[in-house]
Image (cartoon, rainbow, N blue to C red):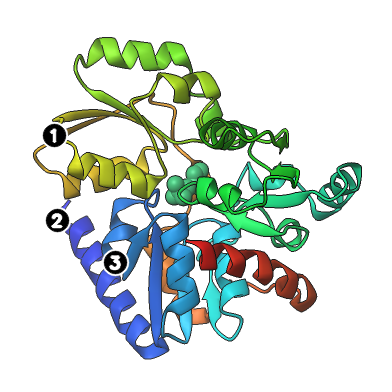
Amino acid sequence: MAQETGMMNDLVREIRELKQKRGAVILAHYYQLPEIKEIADFVGDSLQLAQQAASVDADVIVFCGVYFMAESAKILSPEKTVLLPDKSAGCYLANQATGEAVRKRKQEIPGCVVVTYVNSSADVKAESDIACTSSNAVKVVKSIPEDKPVLFVPDRNLGIYISKRTGRQMYFWEGCCNIHDNLTLEEIEAARAAHPGALVMVHPECRPEVSDAADHVASTGGMLKFAQESSSRSFIVGTEQGLIDTLRKLCPDKEFYPAAEHMICPDMKLTTLEKVKESLEKLEPNIQVDPEIAERARKSLTRMLEIV
Ligand code: 13P
């Protein structure tokens, strides 16, 4: 144990030195492992991370998250080196739409505005009019003129949630995040029974009946804010479990329970301290985006950032 801690301390020290040498910043999503969030310069939700990627003053960004996040960082800051410590860290949801499929669907809905959730590939963003994250999706959809049909890609559950919040009919895409979509109403009810009085917070990527049954529906950053501001002492957390250690750290006097034990995203757990160190040493895996695709995708991301 002591030996393990010693090795970990050495790794952290080496990462800090390398970071300095490379002029790098480390960005991490809330779902990352605790030791990764510990060494990060900035930890946030998808929107906060995109804002950081667009504005941070550094030559190198080490993105501790999944592929589409690092890709968005590269699109927003093409002059920077963007490293994703494990290039195989993908996203089940992002894999459910391709640029070509979106192009085809657009042709079937004349005049439609394509709103694309950031959990998507660069070529899907390039086919889109505007991007959104779960924390600004309602605002983004509200910004679109009422007479324009909206095609929402690729998360169906999030699309339905926005449609309910805005009263707006939209065309949906048949995609979902498997981690959130697997959370059932029965599991929410069982968690409520096990923790009487606890408030249920869920991510809008959950199924409609789960979101409807929750006390609060929000992005990861929104859940943190809600827990910090709420007078309630205990919460059931319906999102990837990585958020829970951050919730406990920021609200040490409150209780947090996972809504279901299975809510763990294996891709988000692929980043390790060893891989972060190696990426800083080798400046690899260095994320690249085709410049033509990046230019079109940047427009949809920039429009989103202007609306926030
Ligand atoms: P937020 O951090 O924006 O809530 O989204 C994270 C995510 O990718 C959910 O699957």
Residue denoted by label 3: 39
* Residue beneath disc 2: 2
- Most foreground residue, 73 or 302: 302
Residue occupying image coordinates x 66% and y 64%: 300
Task: List x then y, in percent, for residue 176.
Answer: 63, 35
Identify which residue is drawn at 55% across, 65% down. 70
Q: Cβ–Cβ below 8 Å for labels 3 and 2?
A: no
Q: Earlier in the sequence, mark 3 or mark 1?
A: 3
**Image point 24% across, 44% down: which residue?**
247
**Does residue 111 appear to the left or right of 156 in the view shown?**
right
Residue type of the residue flagged with mark 1: Ser
Q: Nearer the viewer, mark 3 or mark 1?
A: 1
Q: Residue at x 19, y 58 (%)?
A: 5
Q: Give left or right: position of 101 versus 137.
A: right
For disc 1, the marked residue is 231
- Disc 3 to disc 1, C-alpha distance: 31 Å
* Residue 79 appears left or right of 201: right
Residue 231 x/y as whole percent: 13, 34
In what element is the residue under mark 1? loop
Q: Quadrant of residue 25?
A: bottom left
Q: Quadrant of residue 227?
A: top left
Q: Position of residue 92 (x, y in %)?
A: 63, 42
194 vs 166: above or below: above
Which one is in front, 83 or 161? Answer: 161
**Disc 3 element:** helix
Q: Look at label 2 and name its amino acid.
A: Ala
Nearer the camera: disc 2 or disc 1: 1
Task: Quote the CA–CA distance across marks 2 and 1.
Answer: 39 Å
Q: Is residue 103 left or right of residue 79?
A: right
What mark, if any, has residue 57 been given in the picture?
none
**Residue 283 image position (x, y, % from top left):** 53, 80
